[in-house]
Image: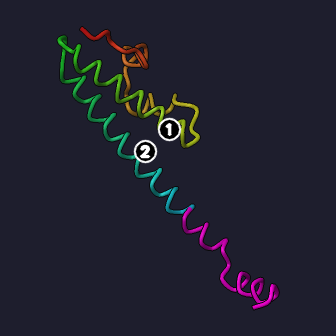
Amino acid sequence: MSLRDSLDLIAMVKPEAGTAALDNEIMAERASSLGAAEAKVIAAMSALAAAGTDNTTALAHGRSVVWAYFVQRELIGFRQHTEVIQSLNIPPEVIAGLGAIEKRQ
């Protein structure tokens, strides 16, 4: 097989089509992952609202889940969180403690 035959074969196979399929699958996985993280935030915010005054555990869980969600968003390329904070009703006390790790005893 000559070099010209190899180049013709590569042109027929169109390797860029293979990367496009992979890129689409990666984007779909990112969207799915972000949707799952958002669902966790919604559940955590509901639990926090239902916890009432004794909300220490729910608040810590909410902060952890929201922090993970924001990290996921930033990895995908979403740097602004203002709209999701409003749309998901994330309270200021959750935002104030993002990234804080409680001291283990």
Q: From the viewer's perspective, is residue 104 above or below residue 82?
A: above
Give the percent coordinates (x, y) of residue 18.
Answer: 59, 72
Q: Magenta segment range?
A: 1-22
Q: Quadrant of residue 6?
A: bottom right
Q: Is residue 36 left or right of residue 25?
A: left
Q: Residues within 10 Å of mark 1 (few under 14, many from 20)?
A: many
Q: Quadrant of residue 101?
A: top left
Residue placed under numbered mark 1 in the picture: 73
Choose the circle earlier in sequence order: 2 or 1. Answer: 2
Q: Is residue 51 left or right of residue 66?
A: left
Q: Is residue 82 left or right of residue 35?
A: right
Give the percent coordinates (x, y) of residue 33.
Answer: 41, 47
Q: Mark 2 to mark 1: distance in Å?
A: 7 Å
* Residue 40 located within the stretch drawn in magenta: no
Instruction: Determine the residue positioned at 28% across, 24% down.
Output: 61
Secondary structure found at label 1: helix
Magenta highlight: main SS: helix
